[in-house]
Amino acid sequence: MAYPIMFNPFFLCMSLSILLIYLPVHHAVNGGFSVKLIRQNSTNALSQRLMDTTQANSYAYLGNYLLELSVGTPPVNIYGILDSGSALIWTQCVPCDNCYKQLDPLFDPKKSSTYKNISCKSDKCHLIYSGACSAQNSCDYSYGYADSSITQGALASETITFKSSTGQPIKVNNIIFGCGHNNTGVFNDHEMGIIGLGRGPTSLISQISSRFGGKKFSQCLVPFHTDISISSKMSFGKGSEVLGVGVVSTPLVNKDDGPLYFVTLLGISVEDTRFEISNNPDSVPKGNMFIDSGTPPTILPQQLYDQVFDEVRKRVPMNPVTDDPQLGPQLCYRTSTNLKGPMITMHFEGADIKLTPIQTFIPPKDGVFCLAFTNTSNGDPGTLGNFAQSNFLIGYDLEKDVVSFKPTDCTK
């Protein structure tokens, strides 16, 4: 769900910006899920620090990851796509004149005592490009994505309630979010909206960082096709650092004011055969790939993709599927068990990420496994998709501009 595209509802014109779950709790040295929260109303500085843990359940479903948040007063659970490639939190709301079908009830702002429309005269209305005035002088928004999905509605503020390890609710007030009244696109009926986790000021991370001790978070995505009943956790703020044996880190590259988390890919190895982005390491463009939890496949430049495709095909001692038009040009194999493919290593600046077949081959249908890579041929940056991110504890430290990876069984 990267590349948000913002629309001005008055001019009906499109402006493309440069853009557009997890584990049981452990102490930071074992994975970075311990969060120290500071209660704002405490009078004792020492008692402000609570060894508590902020919890937000997440689930894998049909190639996306759903983050569970409790919104409003009384709290109502919503399940939005976990998207590090965008910067708006939104959910489908009553009334919904043109919305996609969802299983759970739509969020009804009239039933929440903490819901507030944002005035179009407020600075908050202009935190997203498309903020504009409605007939009632409230802030309307329109926000689009590269897959042609669009949400339109009222920009508002609400209370979001997280769960804590002690069983106590952790309420965060005045979170800016989109109450979507007109939403279309590529959504399934479990997805109630999108939880933007990118760099922008309206993302979840940006809005809660000052309350949780820093602009940091960590995630651990379960593998594709993990049963939706198996949840995992996400961590925010101080204590979410990914530390310990096996951790590798690479710099985040600030290329523009957009929400994306850019990193620099130097090359890829298939077992012991390495392919470089450039024969001259000094000429590799900085920030040539971004990490996106809302995009399933990993997207590579055409030449690098062709090299990886051909080498993987050589290394798998099976005949690829060639008689299934539904699979298109993908590299796929028929097997009744998990495919035993080659190890693929992504060489980032300062960090080698080793991908096993569970991260590089996905089953689009029973008995078939396909290489979870595709290509871009128009010079756009590559994408590290969510299939490749699975079974890594990944920590983003936006204050130090670094992202860290630690191999982890995210189902445990």
Image (cartoon, rainbow, N blue to C red):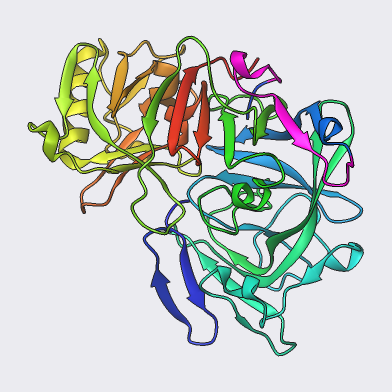
- Residue 281 shows in the view: yes
The part of the image, by quadrant, that contains residue 20 is bottom left
Residue 275 point in image, percent of width and height: 16, 25
- Kindly identify the residue that appears in the image at 33 percent across and 52 percent down: 255
46 vs 374, nearest the viewer? 46
Q: Is residue 182 above or below residue 378?
A: below
- Residue 368 shows in the view: no
The part of the image, by quadrant, that contains residue 48 is top right
Q: Residue furthest left?
A: 279
Residue 219 point in image, percent of width and height: 58, 30
273 vs 62, nearest the viewer? 273
Whether residue 41 appears in magenta in the rendering, the answer is yes
Q: State which region is magenta.
A: 24-43
- Kindly identify the residue that appears in the image at 29 percent across and 37 percent down: 264
The answer to whether 382 appears left or right of 194 in the picture is left
Residue 174 point in image, percent of width and height: 77, 60
Q: Residue furthest bottom?
A: 135
The part of the image, by quadrant, that contains residue 127 is bottom right
281 vs 195, nearest the viewer? 281
The answer to whether 352 appears left or right of 63 in the picture is left
- Kindly identify the residue that appears in the image at 56 percent across and 15 percent down: 409
Whether residue 90 appears in magenta in the rendering, the answer is no
